[in-house]
Image (cartoon, grey):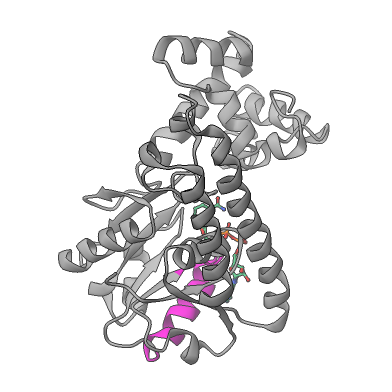
């Protein structure tokens, strides 16, 4: 293993998951949190996601020998699905419990949290001012060797590199929610990122059981959202224009492309509130004759009925 110590800045939904994956794969992992109350919010998240990861391992035993298993096993937790047996999964469960209890630390003192860190992953809320404040504070505390990554979904690294004091060692390493199943790691530098550092982050992503996806230049939305957002928008337009209903639109996509789910099933996973917030960003959303207005109105009607997606038990489908 070339990376030993990892520091995670921010212990929210993604921070907790990233930290757990780092510990699962044997990395000494320290969360830096800003206050006691942050600790009170992060600890239950770590517990919840570690339980979900252990349960995913436990359940995967029943998938051994099932041809569908290869599609649904937790890819971030099991490296060689083709050759795995139930005893080996039990060993992974034991290892996970040990690593979660021994390798995860929480620290309020930023200097202590990043001391000797090989890699620091910033995964705070999307507030540029707060990110700049933290980068500025980190600048003089990071050891020379430390690589600094951001998990920001909506902001590109060139927006922040000048505040880091180490632009050549700063880049984006972007994870997906439920990282232990959806183990993508989009890696995106800014023009000043050292190509050698980029390669090291690719290796780190592999070390923590992610599949590295390399971007050759900056792209807001990375690869996935650059495709997904317009795709979901086109599906919603068909629905809002009353061309077809969500089930038929999904069925068309699935039958014609072989995809396991269609856009409305994906919207249920993303959450209708997120789709609504995206629809509200369209410049013509207040123009009652516009498509954006129609989409946002329809989504709002569903949200008001509590139909916000899979987490609520109902969205476009019932769960
Ligand atoms: N949620 C997702 O599905 C997802 C997916 C990929 C990437 N991301 C990215 O990950 C990052 C975090 O998202 P999240 O969903 O985990 O958010 P979250 O709201 O669950 O967590 C944010 C964390 O940042 C901390 N934080 C906020 N302001 C801070 C400050 N001033 N100083 C120190 N800590 C501060 C909070 O205490 C919290 O621990 C964002 O950049 C987001 O774009 C999120």
Q: Residue furthest right?
A: 305
Question: Residue 160, image x and y in percent?
Answer: 37, 70
Q: Residue at x 43, y 48 (%)?
A: 78
**Left-right relation of 40 to 210:** right
Q: Residue at x 81, y 35 (%)?
A: 306
Q: Main secondary structure of the magenta part?
A: helix
Pick out the residue farthest to the front: 87
| Residue 156 appears in view | no
Res 135 → quadrant = bottom left
Q: Does 112 sit left or right of 101 as displayed?
A: left
- Any part of residue 76 in sight: yes
- How many marks are shown on the rendered structure? 0
Image quadrant occupied by the N terminus: bottom left
Which one is in front, 137 or 5? 5
In percent of width and height, residue 303 lies at: 76, 35
In the picture, which quadrant includes the C terminus? top right
| Closer to the camera in the image, 210 or 218 | 210
Q: Residue at x 38, y 52 (%)?
A: 210
In reply to whether residue 142 is colored magenta, the answer given is: no
Q: Which stretch appears magenta? A: 122-141
Residue 165 image offset from top left, x and y in percent: 31, 82
**Quarter of the figure with residue 39:** bottom right
The quarter of the picture showing ligand 1? bottom right
- Foreground: 248 or 106? 106
Return the residue nearer the eye: 304 or 30.
Answer: 30
| Rendered position, 205 above or below 82 | below
- Looking at the image, residue 268 sits to the left or right of residue 312; the answer is left
């Amino acid at each position: 293993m070339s990376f030993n110590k990892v520091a995670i800045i921010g212990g929210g939904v993604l921070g907790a998951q990233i930290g757990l994956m780092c510990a699962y794969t044997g990395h000494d992992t320290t969360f830096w949190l800003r206050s006691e109350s942050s600790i009170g919010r992060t600890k239950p998240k770590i517990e919840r996601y570690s339980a979900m990861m252990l349960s995913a391992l436990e359940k995967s035993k029943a998938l051994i020998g099932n041809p569908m298993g290869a599609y649904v096993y937790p890819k971030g937790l099991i490296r060689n699905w083709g050759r795995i047996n139930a005893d080996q999964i039990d060993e992974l469960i034991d290892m996970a419990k040990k690593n979660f209890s021994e390798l995860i630390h929480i620290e309020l003192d930023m200097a202590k949290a990043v001391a000797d860190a090989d890699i620091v992953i910033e995964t705070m809320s999307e507030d540029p001012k707060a990110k700049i404040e933290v980068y500025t504070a980190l600048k003089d505390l990071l050891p020379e060797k430390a690589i600094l990554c951001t998990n920001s979904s909506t902001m590109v690294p060139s927006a922040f590199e000048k505040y880091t004091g180490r632009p050549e060692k700063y880049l984006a390493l972007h994870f997906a929610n439920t990282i232990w199943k959806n183990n993508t790691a989009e890696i995106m530098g800014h023009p000043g990122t050292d190509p050698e550092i980029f390669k090291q982050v690719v290796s780190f992503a592999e070390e923590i059981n992610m599949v590295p996806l390399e971007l050759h230049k900056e792209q807001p939305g990375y690869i996935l959202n650059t495709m997904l957002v317009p795709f979901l928008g086109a599906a919603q337009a068909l629905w809002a224009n009353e061309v077809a209903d969500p089930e038929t639109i999904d069925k068309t996509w699935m039958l014609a492309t072989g995809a396991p789910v269609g856009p409305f099933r994906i919207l249920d996973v993303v959450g209708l509130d997120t789709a609504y917030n995206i629809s509200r960003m369209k410049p013509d959303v207040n123009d009652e004759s516009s498509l954006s207005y129609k989409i946002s109105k329809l989504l709002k009607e569903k949200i008001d009925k509590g139909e916000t997606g899979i987490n609520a038990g109902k969205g476009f489908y019932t769960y």
